[in-house]
Amino acid sequence: MTMGLGTALMEGSAIDPVAGDFAERDLASYHVPVHADVRSVEAYWIEEDDRHLNPMGSKGIGESGIVGAAAAIGNAVHHATGVRLREAPMRPDRLLPHLN
């Protein structure tokens, strides 16, 4: 969910028009959510052993949680403002021009 929050609200790259390269060179200029941005996270361990997958029998499903996050946040923005943003990240500078 935290990664989905970042995709929906923060993460985005800009191209430097002079250099023709990414303007964000490090994490100081490329904003991602941090622990303080998220109130609480509940993680659950799913007991499933699949020896055909790898010798440990483990698999990860962490990315599944980000699939609907941007859509849910987009719907919340639409519900609150009446504006449907169709491009991420959904930042105030993209929302404000559509408000009366």
Image: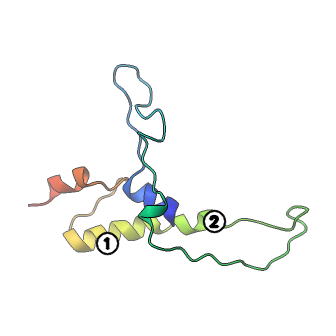
Residue shown at 38% from the left, 31% from the top: 15
Say which element carries label 2. Answer: helix
Residue at the spot of label 1: 76
Q: Which amino acid type is shown beneath numbered disc 2?
A: Gly
Provide residue 72's location: percent of width, then percent of height. Answer: 40, 71
Query: Can you name the residue that lies furthest to the left here?
Result: 100
Question: Which of 3 and 88 lies nearest the eye of the viewer?
Answer: 3
Provide residue 25's location: percent of width, then percent of height. Answer: 47, 32
Question: Which of 97 and 57 lies nearest the eye of the viewer?
Answer: 57
Residue count near mark 2 (Cα–Cα under 10 Å), binned few <14, some 14–19, many ≥20:
few
Residue shown at 85% from the left, 75% from the top: 49
Residue count near mark 1 (Cα–Cα under 10 Å), binned few <14, some 14–19, many ≥20:
some
Q: Which amino acid type is shown beneath numbered disc 1?
A: Ala
**Marked residue nearer the N-terminal end (2 or 1):** 2
How did the renderer colour the structure? rainbow
Question: Which of 12 and 32 lies nearest the eye of the viewer?
Answer: 32
Question: Which of 53 and 9 lies nearest the eye of the viewer?
Answer: 9
Horizontal relation, residue 56 to residue 9: left or right: right
Horizontal relation, residue 23 to residue 46: left or right: left
Horizontal relation, residue 62 to residue 40: left or right: right
Q: Is residue 41 above or below residue 37?
A: below
Residue at the spot of label 2: 62
| Residue 22 found in image quarter | top left
Residue shown at 46% from the left, 51% from the top: 32
| Numbered marks: total | 2
Provide residue 57's location: percent of width, then percent of height. Answer: 86, 68
